[in-house]
Amino acid sequence: MARETDFISVMTDSDILSRLPERLKQARRAQGLSLEAVEKISGVSRSMVSQIERGESNPTVATLLNLTRALNVDFAGLLGEEVAEDRVEILHEHQTPALDRAGDGCKIRILSAPQDAGKLEVYELVFKEGGKLDSKPHARGTREQLIAQEGRLAVTSGVANGTINTGDTARYAADVPHAIEAIDGPARAILMVVKF
């Protein structure tokens, strides 16, 4: 069994601390417990539990131990990497985050999970006729793959350019200025941004 000092060294990792609030909230909700119920079981005040779940308070190791015991979750597992589960996560269309860039004639729906940001990002792009998505260079080594679902799209990457039709895929560097534009009518596409 790990010693308390092992947990303290884990707690100094800011990446792990950033995951803690959501992990605690998920553990509480998975058991159907209210903040009041957690307070009664753990002895940690309802307001403190709420602050921890919102990321507004950095709990002590003792507080975390009380919470993990009350929620019947493993302390190290809660702070470590997520374990894959057998489940299907459904996100309905109305729940999908979207950015409506009306001035550009392009609507962007974010299809990838928040935890994938910075690695693999997936978007649905819906263009009005003449709609355009201009992008500044991403981090060095970033590439994009654009799959045309409907219509025709002109793609520019640096000084290179090309055109794709329904069913076609364009792969190009995204660490230079790049743009996607609907031509000859409205268009829809799936965009994958891969960061190396």
Image (cartoon, grey):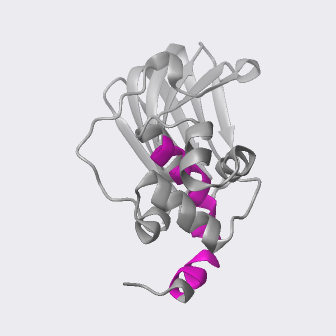
Q: Is residue 119 visible?
A: no
Foreground: 169 or 194? Answer: 194
Foreground: 88 or 76? Answer: 76
Foreground: 53 or 147? Answer: 53
Q: Estimate the x, y position of residue 147 in percent, counting from the top left.
A: 38, 34
- The image quarter in which residue 132 lies: top right
Question: Main SS of the magenta segment?
Answer: helix
Seen from this angle, which residue lies furthest left? 86
Q: Which residue is at 62% across, 71% downward?
A: 62
Residue 11 inside the magenta-drawn segment:
yes
Q: Which residue is at 51% across, 86% downward?
A: 6
Compared with 68, 106 (above or below) is above
Q: Estimate the x, y position of residue 83 in percent, counting from the top left.
A: 33, 59
Q: Is residue 57 visible?
A: yes
Compared with 23, 17 (above or below) is below
Total numbered badges shown on the rendered structure: 0
**The N terminus - image quarter:** bottom left
Q: Which residue is at 40% across, 28% downward?
A: 148
Q: Would residue 184 appear left or right of 2 to someone viewing this image?
A: right
Q: Would residue 132 appear left or right of 80 to someone viewing this image?
A: right
Compared with 106, 70 (above or below) is below
Q: Estimate the x, y position of residue 95 in percent, counting from the top left.
A: 52, 22
Q: Estimate the x, y position of residue 161 in percent, counting from the top left.
A: 53, 43
Q: Would residue 116 appear left or right of 130 to someone viewing this image?
A: left
Q: Which residue is at 45% across, 27% downward?
A: 189
Q: What is the span of residues highlighted in magenta in the rendered image?
A: 6-28
Residue 120 inside the magenta-drawn segment:
no
Foreground: 25 or 148? Answer: 25
